[in-house]
Image (cartoon, rainbow, N blue to C red):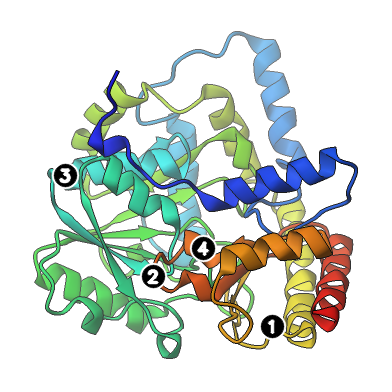
């Protein structure tokens, strides 16, 4: 049988790196994982305890498409606690991870062939989901002087139907402040285009609180997830906030595409939101790891880096070391036993000169990984 043109998406390179690392581990090697953007911790204990109680109380079936009302209300309350935003729970849609939010958002907002601008470097699945939906991803090559975030001048002369931003960003960890976020929102709306804010790394910040687009406008789609700050990657539950007049549009799509997010994950997510002590203990690990990375990477020879405001990544320009980041990452895995992600995942044009290092794992692993990287670079 033939396959569709829309299905011709690129592979997610970090998953290939993970597979190579797994094969090395199966062969008996000890690999330090700096490739995967996944917390080394599991779901908070309060989340798993709540799910156990729910499972013992009776069967878990479908929920309504928009999600458990209690969870939607708790998410809305969080916006008041974190950002002083008064959010109507009716605007909250619980999704099957942020990926489900992207699919729903892109489908609700754009028609076949529409052009949607995304910053490069950026999360690779934006581009591939857009392609699979027969939409056109328009890369905006962001500049180091703008902290690898888009600015209005990057798309001033473009015909676009939407702009997708991420703050804190993957792979750089850089953030938009109120002024930068506001300028992008204004420039997007001036074109009659839709604004989408990926806020999946909110909560994982170091020196300043991340800005939500909802502080500045109600005319935006905000997408988030329980995967990162709440340490629930495998549970596949997230949420989106949409304008009031878009709720029914998204609800109809969700009913048909997903029916609902997993009931069990929604129960756990609701409880996780009140596990602040455990979540802040995770943040203490990320803070320690970040300090190690910002000290150890330059000592190992990776000197041109974007200091992360949030998330748990360091993005490094390695153009002085290689013009083939994929081969370089394979060499690091083979010789140092450290798995890192080549920048081609995030920037198809300039990514051959960059690497992403994740520091989401245990601090002891990060420290050993940095020692291995230094030894590798000293011997290279």
Q: Earlier in the sequence, mark 3 or mark 4?
A: 4
Q: Position of residue 253 (x, y in %)?
A: 25, 30
Vertical placement of residue 334 versus 240, above or below: below
Q: Is residue 240 visible?
A: yes
User: Which one is closest to the eye, mark 3 or mark 2?
Assistant: 2
Q: Earlier in the sequence, mark 1 or mark 3?
A: 3
Q: Which residue is mark 1?
A: 302
Q: Position of residue 41 (x, y in %)?
A: 76, 48
Is label 1 in contact with label 4 (beta carbons under 8 Å)?
A: no
Q: Quadrant of the N terminus?
A: top left
Mark 3 residue element: helix
User: Which one is closest to the eye, mark 1 or mark 2?
Assistant: 2
Is label 1 in contact with label 3 (beta carbons under 8 Å)?
A: no
Q: Is residue 357 visible?
A: no
Q: Which residue is mark 4?
A: 82
Query: CA gap, disc 3 to disc 2?
Result: 38 Å
- Tell me what residue is drawn at x 50 percent, y 71 percent: 352
């Amino acid at each position: 049988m033939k396959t569709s043109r829309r299905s011709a998406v690129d592979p997610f390179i970090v998953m290939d790196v993970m597979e190579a690392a797994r094969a090395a581990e199966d062969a008996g090697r000890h690999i330090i994982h700096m490739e995967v953007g996944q917390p080394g911790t599991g779901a908070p204990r309060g989340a798993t305890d709540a799910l156990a109680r729910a499972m013992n109380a009776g069967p878990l079936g479908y929920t309504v498409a928009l999600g458990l009302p209690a969870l939607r209300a708790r998410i809305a309350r969080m916006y008041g606690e974190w950002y002083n935003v008064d959010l109507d729970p009716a605007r909250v849609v619980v999704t099957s991870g942020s990926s489900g939010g992207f699919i729903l958002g892109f489908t609700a907002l754009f028609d076949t062939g529409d052009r949607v601008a995304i910053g490069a470097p950026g999360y690779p699945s934006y581009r591939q989901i857009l392609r699979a939906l027969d939409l056109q991803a328009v890369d905006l090559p962001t500049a180091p002087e703008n902290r690898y975030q888009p600015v209005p001048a990057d798309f001033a002369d473009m015909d676009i139907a939407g702009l997708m931003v991420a703050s804190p960003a993957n792979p750089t960890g850089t953030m938009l402040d109120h002024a930068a976020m506001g300028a992008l929102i204004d420039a997007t709306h001036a074109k009659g285009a839709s604004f989408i804010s990926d806020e999946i790394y909110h909560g994982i910040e170091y020196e300043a609180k991340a800005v939500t687009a909802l502080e500045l406008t109600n005319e935006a789609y905000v997408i988030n997830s329980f995967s990162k700050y709440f340490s629930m990657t495998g549970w596949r539950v997230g949420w989106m906030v949409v304008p009031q007049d878009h709720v029914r549009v998204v609800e109809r799509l969700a009913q048909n595409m997903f029916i609902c997010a997993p009931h069990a994950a929604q129960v756990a997510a609701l409880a996780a939101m009140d596990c602040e002590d455990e979540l802040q203990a995770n943040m203490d690990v990320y803070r320690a790891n970040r300090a190690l990375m910002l000290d150890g990477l330059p000592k190992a020879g990776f000197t041109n880096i974007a200091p992360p405001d949030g998330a748990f990544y360091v993005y490094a320009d390695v153009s002085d070391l290689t013009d083939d980041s994929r081969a370089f990452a394979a060499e690091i895995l083979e010789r140092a036993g450290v798995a890192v992600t080549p920048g081609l995942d995030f920037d198809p044009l300039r990514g051959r000169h960059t690497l992403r290092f994740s520091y989401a794992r245990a601090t002891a692993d990060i420290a050993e990984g940095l020692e291995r990287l230094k030894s590798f670079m000293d011997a290279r």
